[in-house]
């Protein structure tokens, strides 16, 4: 699974990490602006190496927002 963040809700998603197994995962947030409350995130299912295009092309299986900025 690949985790995506949307720095701008109307803009393109930014990949922030891959999840290969059910466990705690640290996400790479350095490619996007500082997260804000109500930050939108999505998880897609795709190839083990991640999206080959740098954007989500696979089905989104979960999405939600952060309740507060960390």
Image (spheres, helix red, strand yellow):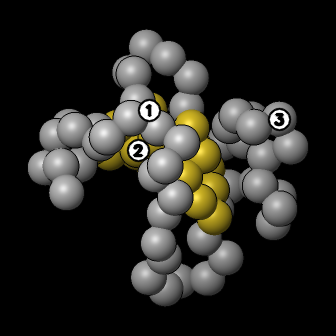
**Number of numbered discs on residues:** 3
Residue wearing tag 1: 6
> Can residue 3 be seen here?
no
Residue displayed at 44% across by 82% down: 24
Judging from the image, what secondary structure is the residue with disc 3 in? Answer: loop
- Residue, disc 2: 41
Q: Residues within 10 Å of mark 3 (few under 14, many from 20)?
A: few
Residue at the image point whose x is 60% and y is 70% from the top = 19
The answer to whether residue 26 is above or below residue 9 is below
Q: Which callout, 3 or 1, points at the residue further toward the start of the chain?
A: 1
Residue 57 visible in the current orientation: yes
The spot of residue 29 in percent (x, y) is: 46, 52
Spatial CA distance of label 2 from label 3 is: 18 Å
Q: Which quadrant of the figure has residue 46?
A: bottom right
In the picture, the quarter occupied by the C terminus is: bottom left
Q: For residue 19, which numbered disc appears in the image? A: none
Q: Which residue is tagged 3?
A: 53
Q: CA distance from mark 3 to mark 1?
A: 16 Å
SS of the residue under disc 1: strand
């Amino acid at each position: 699974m690949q985790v995506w963040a949307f720095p701008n809700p109307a803009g393109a998603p930014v990949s922030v990490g891959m999840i290969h197994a059910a466990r705690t995962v640290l996400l790479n947030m350095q490619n996007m602006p500082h997260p804000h409350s109500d930050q939108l995130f999505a998880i897609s299912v795709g190839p083990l190496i991640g999206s080959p295009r740098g954007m989500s092309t696979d089905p989104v299986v979960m999405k939600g927002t952060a309740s507060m900025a960390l």
